Image (cartoon, rainbow, N blue to C red):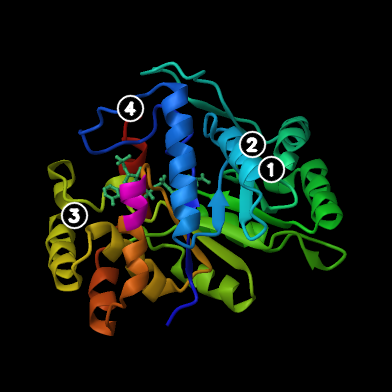
């Protein structure tokens, strides 16, 4: 049985608009309702055995919700992770038409966001560069890298990157070479891997063999694993997922999560549950195993990263 755990990511819990593919979304979008829902999902997740929680300053009020929950619940068995590099700018305006988050990988942004995020200590265990890219220059920014190394030593943190886009493999290749005095800077990699996007499989296996922490995000391809007429190219995958869902008496989400657990055996797969029903459904992934043939069949539904990320960039925030 795999040792992989399921963690909870707060991307959908801290701000009123996120990538929502399905249409039935008549929910109360007030700050109070979001705060109450976030606490409910956090409490339920902890009750159900989840101990790993991932957030970022750009998830609206997500980081504040997690800090308040962490301070009030005083659990001493949770592992929190956050990031630096993106700022939330939509100011809780519904249907905000501009970019909701602005990227800035400067030393000034790192210092500014660290001052807030450090309130998560000592439960903060992983501190990550949010969406490190080659073009942002962050993996060559010696001020940023040295400061991260300083934080790693001062607070016994694991330092990580998260990656997105067609260059995920290249980004990881660059990151894994960065070291200070022979010590790797990065201990943790948060990467997109799912039924449709499997380009990082080999490099993630290599990192796992070197005892790195591998956290999988966007495990449900932002909801695209669920049958959807807008994505007709995934029709065969939808039919097969439905067949497995019936066989194991779980939802498509649990099959998609289990595929990652069985095929890759990462350290952690993040659930992006938006409510307590979804987290309960997602956790059913821990109650069964896919057989070798099923894993192989699901592996065949991968598409070219260029196609995957083009489709991803067309998704709307609502
Ligand atoms: N570092 C980065 O750049 C980055 C980027 C993305 C994500 N992440 C991390 O990864 C976490 C997960 O990623 P994600 O939320 O973007 O993507 P995801 O896990 O692929 O998709 C989550 C979405 O799937 C739907 N869903 C989940 N369970 C369901 C169920 N049982 N039934 C129906 N729908 C269900 C929900 O959509 P609806 O809201 O439509 O119901 C939910 O918002 C985030 O919270 C965050 O911590 C990091």
Q: Residue drawn 49% across and 48% down?
A: 43
Left or right: 246 in relation to 138: left
The residue lying at 55 percent from left, 49 percent from top is 54
Expressed as whole percent of the image width and height from the top left, the position of residue 128 reads 65, 49
Q: Is residue 85 above or below residue 175?
A: above
User: Which tag is nearer the camera, tag 3 or tag 4?
Assistant: 4
Is disc 2 in contact with disc 1, using a CB cutoff of under 8 Å? yes
On screen, residue 8 versus residue 281, left or right, reads right
Q: Where residue 85 is drawn, which disc sits there?
A: 2
SS at circle 4:
loop
In 3D space, how far apart are the residues under numbered discs 1 and 3 (Cα atoms)? 35 Å
First in sequence: mark 2 vs mark 3? 2
Task: Tell me if mark 3 has few (under 14), some (14-19) or many (20+) residues whose alpha carbon lies within 10 angstroms of its own.
Answer: some
CA–CA distance in space, label 4 to label 1? 30 Å
Mark 4 to mark 2 CA distance (whole Å): 23 Å
For label 3, the SS is: helix
Q: Report how far apart the C-alphas of labels 2 and 3 lie in the structure.
A: 33 Å
Q: In terms of sequence position, does the residue under pointer 4 or pointer 2 come before the other?
A: 2
Highlighted magenta segment, given as a residue range: 276-280
Tell me, for residue 234, which label it has, or none. 3
- Give the labeled residue for mark 4: 318
Where is residue 5? Give x, y as percent.
48, 67
Left or right: where 185 falls relative to 245: right
* Residue 247, horizontal then vertical, whole percent: 15, 73
């Amino acid at each position: 049985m795999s040792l992989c755990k399921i963690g909870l990511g707060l991307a959908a819990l801290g701000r009123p608009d996120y990538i929502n593919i399905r249409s039935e979304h008549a929910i109360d979008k007030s700050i109070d309702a979001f705060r109450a829902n976030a606490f409910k999902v956090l409490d339920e997740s902890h009750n159900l055995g989840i101990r790993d929680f991932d957030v970022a300053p750009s998830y609206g009020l997500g980081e504040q919700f997690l800090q308040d929950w962490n301070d009030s619940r005083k659990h001493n068995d949770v592992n929190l992770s956050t990031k630096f590099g993106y700022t939330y700018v939509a100011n809780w305006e519904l249907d905000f038409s501009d970019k909701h988050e602005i990227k800035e990988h400067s030393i000034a942004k790192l210092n500014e966001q660290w001052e807030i995020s450090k309130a998560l200590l000592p439960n903060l265990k992983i501190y990550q560069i949010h969406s490190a890219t080659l073009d942002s220059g962050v993996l060559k920014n010696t001020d940023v890298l040295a400061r991260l190394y300083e934080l790693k030593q001062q607070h016994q943190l694991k330092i990580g990157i998260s990656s997105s886009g067609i260059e995920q493999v290249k980004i990881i290749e660059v990151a894994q070479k960065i070291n200070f005095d022979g010590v790797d800077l990065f201990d943790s990699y948060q990467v997109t891997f799912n039924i449709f996007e499997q380009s990082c499989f080999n490099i993630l296996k290599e990192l796992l063999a070197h005892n790195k922490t591998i956290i999988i995000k966007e495990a449900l391809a932002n909801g695209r694993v669920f049958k959807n007429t807008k994505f007709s190219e995934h029709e065969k995958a939808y039919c097969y997922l439905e067949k497995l869902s019936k066989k194991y008496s779980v939802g498509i989400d649990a099959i998609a999560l289990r595929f990652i657990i069985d095929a890759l055996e990462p350290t952690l797969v993040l659930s992006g549950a938006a409510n307590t029903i979804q987290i309960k459904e997602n956790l059913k992934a821990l109650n069964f195993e896919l057989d070798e043939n099923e894993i192989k069949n699901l592996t065949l539904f991968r598409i070219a990263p260029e196609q995957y990320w083009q489709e991803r960039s067309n998704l709307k925030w609502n």
